[in-house]
Image: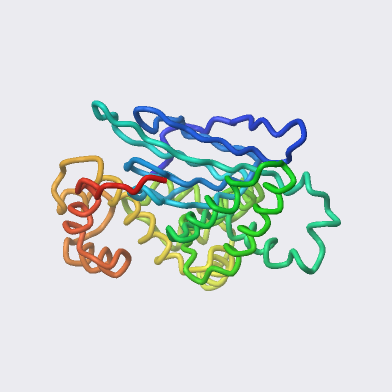
Amino acid sequence: MKSPHQPLLERIPLSGPASLAIREFEAPAFRYPWHQHPEIELTWILKGSGLRYVGDSVEPFHAGDFCLLGSNLPHTWMSSEKNGTTVRSRVVQFDPARWGATLLHLPEFARMADLFDRADRGLCFGGAAAGRMRVKLFSRPSPLLQFTALLEILEELAADPNARTLTLAPWSRGRRANADSRLGAVLAYLAENAAGRVSHAEAARLARLSPAAFSRFFRRAVGKTFQAYLTDMRLSEACRQLLESGRTISEIAFDVGFGNLSNFNRSFRLARGMPPGEFRRQALAPPTPEPSP
């Protein structure tokens, strides 16, 4: 369940007259290493499909995928190279710390500050938001107008009721703050043992709390119960295997830690809105032709 390796630290060129970097990438495939950086990032996939890795989230993506990723949230988009085709993305990276504490503490920025906090878990938005970004940000001729366009976009995203959280728990600030804490010990225990036997009592012992106190502590810290978090971890790994291997659904169910196939199918349907076989079929189906950006 762990990431394949420690994320690389990417250095973003935020120098000169601009406090944000706007870049476009085109290549035979998305193959950038698993990485992180202090800057917040907006990523818009113009062309291509594959798997999006954000923290502990593994999901398929297609053209139109539009995400806001918080500071130091590890991520990458991966795809297979196909003869004669290319993939393309646009990325906006910025560090709000460069804007100054006074600006960020203005009441007008309250919703944006909340958006940045939520972005620590990664946020996915619909294609309409991506279209507005293209019109507003990429058509502005000067750094100042690009900056004001970015603020307009972030204000819209902060008010978007359909934003979907990607990771199971805060990764950047939360992971650093809790690296040596009670929650950090529990998360490490789950990462090592989620596919096998996991004990609520052992997790409570690692957190140095009684089982009842641990249940309250975990729910406050993570936003869901210990069992719900464990189920989500197992389902995330199941999704990865469904998309990256030819193993049967029953093999995957038992491998990720479910005791029986019916429980796995029921949990998967509740979480993804479809049975695992349909999830695999839809995710691996060839994407429909993408409109020209």
Q: Quadrant of residue 267?
A: bottom left
Left or right: 177 with respect to 273? right
Foreground pick, 222 / 26: 26
Q: Please tell me whether residue 249 is drawn above or below residue 88 in the rendered image.
A: below
- Relative height, residue 164 to residue 18 (above, below): below
Q: Is residue 101 left or right of residue 28?
A: right
Residue 242 seen by the camera: no
Measured from the top left, where is residue 199 in percent x and y? 40, 59
Q: Residue at x 59, y 31 (%)?
A: 9
Is residue 99 shown to the viewer in this render?
Answer: yes
| Residue visible at 51% across and 71% down in the picture | 161
The image shows residue 199, relative to residue 285, as above or below, that is: below
- The N terminus - image quarter: top left
Q: How many numbered discs, if any?
A: 0
Whether residue 210 sits left or right of residue 148 in the image: it is left
Q: Residue at x 28, y 51 (%)?
A: 238
The x, y position of residue 185, in whole percent, is 55, 50
Q: Position of residue 177 (x, y in %)?
A: 66, 50
Work out whether residue 105 or residue 275 is closer to the camera in this orientation and state it: 105
